[in-house]
Amino acid sequence: MSTTTDGIEGAGTKAPSLDPLSSLMMLPFEVASQTMDQWLNPKTALPDVLEQAGAMMDAGLAGDGPIGNGEDAAHWADVAGRMQAKWMEFQTQQAGKAMSGLLSGDLFKAELNGLASLSPAMNEMLAQWGRQIPLVRPETQQKLLSDGMKLWEGVLAQWGLHTGKGEAQTAALPRSDRRFADAAWRETPYFALVHQTYLLMAEQITAMADSVEGLDEPRKEQLRFYTRTMIEALSPDHFALTNPLVMEKAIETRGESLVKGLEHLLEDVKRGQLSHTNRDAFKVGENIAATPGKVVHRTPFYELIQYSPSTEQVMATPLLIFPPWINRFYILDLNAKKSFVKWAVDQGITVFLVSWKSADPNDPDMDWGAVTWDDYIGAQIEAIDVVRERLKVPSVHTIGYCVAGTTLAATLAVLARRGEAEKVASATFFTAQVDFEKAGELKTFIDDQQLAAIGALAQNGVIDGRYLAATFNLLRSQDLIWSYVTRNYLLGEDYSAFDLLFWNGDSTNLPAGWHQSYLRDLYRDNLLVQPDALSGCGTPIDLSRITTPAYIQAGREDHIAPPESVWRLSGQLKNSPHVFVLAGSGHIAGVVNPPAAKKYQFWTNDEQAENLAAFVAQAKETPGSWWNHWLGWLQEQAPEQVAAKGKRIPGGRGDKVLADAPGDYVRAR
């Protein structure tokens, strides 16, 4: 991709001393390290901590209780010793290892070596954050003090000051939050005060961030984001001594929950990535990404999979799916019940899908440092031609998901400019943006400082995919970070087997050059909607030249590609007949919603609407999945049917194929 604007100075050079995003990504391990310090600090014996907590919860554990007697004291000493041994073994393994990059795991390990305090980078970020939040103003301090005193007086009054638990179960507390829904947070004045004070402070500090003056809107959005993230990180349910459930679980399991939680933490630190699910429960090609098919074409950049038909007749025009290369393709092929690929095959569609290769800094066949957006546009055009030639058809239907949908729009514009628009019979866009003015919270990370820092992370032209995975998790940190810190590190719960979360953690590495230009030219400078400001494979890009029929799907609760942003694609397709559909749920569940699940809903509107709000106001709501609606639209574009024979059956007689689906690239790590 070429552009008429200059790039970011300093990109690819040494990172700035402070990278706020990198510091935020460290938060789960920073917070967990504080708990490990509490448990393993030799000055604070584990049995003493638990006994004090038990007394605080009026659990009857003091004196000659279950922790206080000799036999159980020996048991708790053994638990503490096992935890210390595991920690020392981990520290020994890491000794002498040099840092090899932000998300190689080594930086996380190095940070965890300083258990007693937050990292210097985190301290610096907190200081900058504090300077922008007007806590030092006398009127602000007075309001906090006044509201805090009223809160404490009100909460303590529920118990008649210090009457113990009992009345607390029916006490009406002024603030509520799902994190503190368990009765244990209300049964004792101490824990009630802890979480109510936290909610008060969160409320006040959020209001302060909103009231800050002198910042432009992008900077103010950054402040709001960092404020929310810091507030969520400091929630009392993330720290053992302020979470009654952690104490109860430790006593109930006689310390085994603490040992297991430490094991979970150390395993994640070694891996350099927070776990969401039991990774041993899934195997690609067996119980995930298992729809039958063959790899029919391969380049150093991607594999092309053709899926085996399940019907005797199929649509004459095949479907070519371009999944995003930021994650593995099998989000569209999770299992037989959720698989969009299998469902489409069962509807009589000949389905092809591109499996992108994860960028590898040591790849002998690819110079990933030289990869640009042109390579992805060129790959889409090539894959279209390969399918057309293989089946001897004039055109193909296409689907582009997320970033691959953005690229598909550019590809269609290139083909239109070249007079080759007829190669694509239709284009479907899953949660794809082309106008990035309203691109949501991801724009929080797009400024010169962040771009320079991201560029400096590259190793041999490659960005570690775990960095991107952590970035997306930050957008929903309560659901995708902190709930797992609490459950799996502090409570020591086992990981559940969830295919969607397995996919979410199966990150892919990215070409650094493409990533930089994508963030700069699209997210920051919004050049794709400016005619001829960008070019693809030497051809200027003007989206208004696209005439291909289009189906645009957006997720109503999408936090990555907000529906308002996706809606704007319809305004760019001035010469293309198009349909816009708003699906219930978000970026993933709004797409992966099979009809049999009977979940969510979708909205359609045959009338022309000026904006998304007008579309929704006049829209028809239909319960369930939008997949059948899309199928009807697709069949209208090209209703012809043919027999499923010859090369419609990949790997049949005389058909040379390269491998069974899901191929080799999806398994590469």
Image: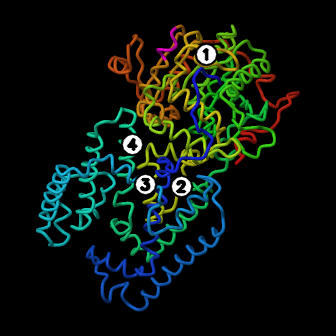
Q: Amino acid at mark 3?
A: Glu
Viewer-closest of 383 and 133: 133
Residue that carries the numbered disc 4 in the rendered image = 225
What is the number of the mark on residue 182?
none
Viewer-closest of 328 and 365: 365
Distance CA(mark 3)–CA(mark 2):
24 Å
Distance CA(mark 1)–CA(mark 4):
34 Å
Q: Amino acid at mark 4?
A: Phe
Distance CA(mark 1)–CA(mark 3):
43 Å
Lower position in the chain sequence, tag 1 or tag 3: 3
User: Does 215 sit above or below residue 68?
Assistant: above
Label 3 with label 2: CB-CB less than 8 Å: no
Residue that carries the numbered disc 1 in the rendered image = 541
Residue 619: percent from the left, percent from the top?
37, 19
Per the image, label 3 sits on a secondary structure element best described as: helix
User: Does 51 sit above or below residue 219?
Assistant: below
Label 4: few (<14), some (14–19) or many (≥20) C-alpha neighbours in 10 Å: some
Label 1 with label 2: CB-CB less than 8 Å: no
The quarter of the picture where the N terminus appears is top right
Look at the image and say whether residue 86 sits in the magenta stretch.
no
Residue 531: percent from the left, percent from the top?
55, 13
Label 2: few (<14), some (14–19) or many (≥20) C-alpha neighbours in 10 Å: many
Per the image, label 4 sits on a secondary structure element best described as: helix
Residue that carries the numbered disc 2 in the rendered image = 274
Lower position in the chain sequence, tag 1 or tag 2: 2
Distance CA(mark 1)–CA(mark 2):
40 Å
Residue 401: percent from the left, percent from the top?
57, 29
What is the number of the mark on residue 124?
3
Label 4 with label 2: CB-CB less than 8 Å: no
